[in-house]
Image: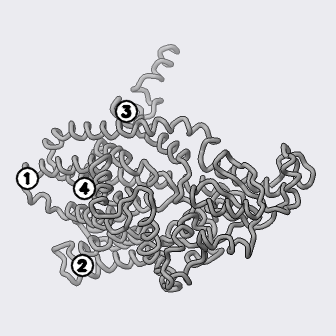
Amino acid sequence: MHGDSRAALWRPSSGWVPKRWHALTPARFLIYAILAFVLIGLFGRIVTFPLGHDEQIHVSAGQLLFQAPLYQALGYNHLPGLPLLLHTLYALTGDSYLLLKGRLLIFLCWIATGLLLYRFALRQTGDRHVALVALLVLVAGVLMGPAGMLVTNNFLPVPFAILSFDLFLRGLDESRIRPGLLFLSGLAMGFAAVLKVSYVFLGPPFALAALLLPRALPFGERVRQVFVPLIIGGLVGCSPALVVLISDPYGLFAHTVRYFSHGHLAYWEQATAAKAMSFPEKIMVAEGVWLAGSGLLALILAGVFAGTLVRRAGAAALAWWPIPLAAALAAFGALGAFVPTPAFPQYYEPPVPFFILLFILLYRRLDAEARHWMAAVLGSVGALALISVTPRLAAAVPGVAQPVRWTGMVTHERGQQIRAVLDRAGARGRVATLSPIAVLEGGLPIYREFAAGPFLYRVAQYLPAGDRPYFTTTTPHGLSAFLDADPPAAILVGEEGDLDAAFASYARLRGYRMLPIGGDETGLFVRPGADGLALLERGVSHNGAPLSERTAD
């Protein structure tokens, strides 16, 4: 009896076993295993991805926001969405581990994007396999590079763009119009643009759709119930940029439009690094994004599904309004990608999520028999996506269990080392560097003229004379005079290559003593005359403590 009773507890039919375990088929287990692998690999890749130059300007702006004007003092050259997001994060969690927290924000952005895309696919198709393939296609492209790994504004707008599209569709549900959802759609659309100005491409297609849909509604009612809520939401979403525009219109214009159309362009015209300046060169960059990885796989599925739909139901089946809207958003995103010069791969990523949304919507229109035949196509594309991304994800998995290798931890530790060295040397004052993150991680003051990292300093000499009053910086030729007016306690070099040369030259000419910190590439020059410098070079701090003894923070 007892033996039989105990055995019954372990039978699948027993009530002791959770019901959801009964449905854990091999296919479902495989889906969960793939999702777990992607999730763990993504986390490992994000936290171990090497420090990027672009992160310098965003992290420092997030930390120093409200301590100095964002544009004229800190030299920020994007709309204020990301600094606001980072500053809020730092205000809630503390001002240490700045880079690590930023990387965790990027990981949360991936989670949000995955959940939104998965739920959208399930809502539209009711098929978990379509949802899984959509996720795999998303991670198989350019976003697995710096654009989707670093603390920048390249990937952060994506979940807001997807959310805006989803809410717009739900707000125009066939049964009734929901102005509240349309307001939220506009809110997400506006904030996407505040994070990255190139996402203004969302506006025209959504605005036009709001004036045309639903067709059965009189035009005046469309304006009142659809267009007005959407536009109000958009204005609220982009209100941070509107506030800056009202309070500092010339500074905003100089640091965004004028910066990229003059100083930035002139710098790259004379730079010897590989770049895409002409339209044919931009086409080649676009081809590497749209006809490879995520872009290619999504377009293959969209093309196959569209062709099947036309053959079985006629071209009129493509006129279901969400399909042209997704196609228009992809087209506007693609056209906008050609505006910046020079071109970089991340500029061509915005249309790709809409390629994915497009194939999901096309799949929804297929009948049951067509879906059955398309299962092999879906499986093949999903397998290709998984195969293409597996090496990068698998290589990052071990790093998850090794926090000492995480880039944010390494950078924070370097900042603490810099602080300890300067404390022991008795050096007080600001640190001059084009790599401000490490200094800020140590809780040390920096020159706001270099808060933008290399981005403002390298273009300063190319700025038009009329724009220079709106910029606070110096040039390589004027660096010595600038630093002589307020000598730094230390100078940190090593991350910015040739741009660091003038800093290192100044330090040597002024008698700064170089102390190795954080490896061969990075050097910390300490001001001559610091109380404990001579003792530090002999192995003790200025208060007589051996260097092996760690000073308290």
Is residue 128 shown above or below 222? Answer: above
Local crowd size for mark 4, using a 10 Å CA cut-off: few (<14), some (14–19), many (≥20)? many
According to the image, label 1 marks what residue? Answer: 313
Can see residue 243? no
Which residue is at the front of the view, 33 or 102? 102
Q: Secondary structure at mark 1?
A: helix
Sequence-wise, the earlier of marks 1 and 2 is 2
Q: In this image, 325 relative to 285: left or right? A: left
Residue picked out by circle 3 = 30
The amino acid beneath tag 2 is Arg
- Mark 1 vs mark 4, foreground winner is 4
Q: Is residue 103 above or below residue 530?
A: above
**Separation of marks 1 and 3 at Cα, in angstroms:** 34 Å
Amino acid at pointer 4 = Leu
- Residue located at (40% from left, 36% from top): 390
Tell me how far mark 1 sits from mark 4, CA to CA: 18 Å
SS of the residue at dot 3? helix
Q: Are marks 1 and 4 in contact (CB under 8 Å)?
A: no
Tag on residue 358?
4
Q: CA distance from mark 1 to mark 2?
A: 30 Å
Q: Pick whichever, 409 or 451, lies toward us.
A: 451
At x 56%, y 78%, the residue is 471
**332 or 314, which is in the foreground?**
332
Label 2: element kind: helix
Q: How was the colour assigned to the protein in this rendering?
A: one colour
Report crowding for label 1: few under 14, some 14 to 19, many 20 or more residues within 10 A (C-alpha). Answer: few
Q: Position of residue 85 (x, y in %)?
A: 54, 65
The residue mark sitting in front, 4 or 2, is 4
